[in-house]
Amino acid sequence: METVLEIIVRPTEIDVNGHVNNAKFVEYLEWGREEWYERNGLPYDRLQAMGAATVTVNVNLNYRRECRQGERLTIVTRPVRLGRTSFTLAQEIRKPDGAVAADATVVLVTIDPTTRKPCVVPPELARAVEAS
């Protein structure tokens, strides 16, 4: 299931060049992923109850357009691939006119919270990923 999160660029997210600092885009993507988990009924405590946690192992991020203070941005997150112990989410950060400011693919691995070793994606999480 695709999720959408709207945010407004704050003054503290602007760098010396007068636009959103590149590191903030990574944070925006994280906010979008958290929204995806929540909307799919998979908050952190629910994953823990399933004996799993997810960790980000790869972020491939393309910066397309600069964003400025006060802009309303939309973060779109959708699953694109399910593996045995991992899954991939595609994300976009869109400007008010719909132009893509950034796009990314993010690979996450499920781990056992106790052993910290990879584990099979729990069925409930797998269903959310496959619903795309």
Image (cartoon, grey):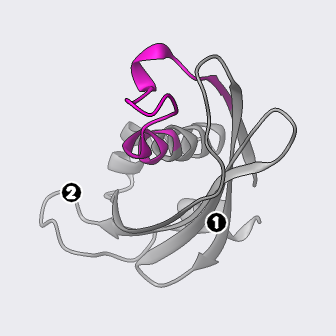
In this figure, which residue is indicated by the disc labeled 1?
129
Q: Residue at x 27, y 75 (%)?
A: 118
**Residue 113: assigned label:** 2
Q: Residue at x 55, y 45 (%)?
A: 37
Q: Position of residue 4 (x, y in %)?
A: 73, 39
Given the image, on which type of amino acid does mark 2 rest? Pro
Left or right of 28 in this view: 57: left
Q: Dot 2 lies on which element?
A: loop
Q: Residues within 10 Å of mark 2 (few under 14, many from 20)?
A: some
Which stretch appears magenta?
6-28
Q: Earlier in the sequence, mark 2 or mark 1?
A: 2
Left or right of 24 in this view: 36: right
Q: Position of residue 7 (x, y in %)?
A: 63, 25
Q: Residue at x 52, y 47 (%)?
A: 29
Asked if the magenta segment contains residue 116, the reply would be no
Asked if the magenta segment contains residue 17, the reply would be yes
Q: Residues within 10 Å of mark 1 (few under 14, many from 20)?
A: many
The alpha-carbon separation of the residues under discs 2 and 1 comes to: 20 Å
In the figure, 64 relative to 18: above or below?
Answer: below
Q: Residue at x 57, y 23 (%)?
A: 9
In the figure, 28 relative to 120: above or below?
Answer: above
In this view, which residue lies farthest toward the front?
17
